[in-house]
Image (spheres, rainbow, N blue to C red):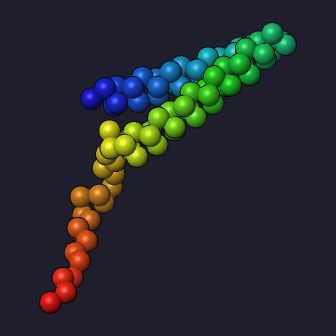
Amino acid sequence: MITKSIIIFAFILIIISLGFALFNLVKHKDQEQSEKTVKALTVRITLSIILFIFLFIAVATGMFKPNGIGMHMKKPVQTEQAQ
């Protein structure tokens, strides 16, 4: 449950950062606001990379099990036994 909470929190931070960058891009056209836009987009990219690494580690260690489309339809692999 904590893993899902961390992922949701990271997505919220990414969306907030993206919204802040969009606000600065649309509302103001001067150099100072342009720097704020770049900084907000840099924060978004950094958060996205950290989230990707966290998801990779969580799946690799088994803390998070993906259950996307078609995952319930997979049949277990059966091995033939030598007689």
Q: Residue 32, percent across and down?
A: 81, 9
List the single residue furthest toward the bottom: 83
**In the figure, 23 relative to 63: above or below?**
above
Residue pictured at 47% horizontal, 28% vertical: 11
Q: Is residue 55 left or right of residue 2?
A: right
Residue pictured at 27% horizontal, 29% vertical: 1
Image quarter of residue 26: top right
- The number of discs equals 0
Q: Residue 59, percent across and down?
A: 39, 44
List the single residue furthest toward the top: 32
List the single residue furthest toward the right: 31
**In the figure, 50 relative to 70: above or below?**
above
Q: Residue 49, percent across and down?
A: 58, 34
Image quarter of residue 81: bottom left
Image quarter of residue 48: top right
Front in this rendered view, residue 3 or 73: 3
Residue pictured at 84% horizontal, 13% vertical: 31
Q: Is residue 20 left or right of residue 7?
A: right
Whether residue 21 is visible here, answered yes or no, is no
Residue pictured at 34% horizontal, 51% vertical: 68
**In the figure, 71 relative to 58: above or below?**
below
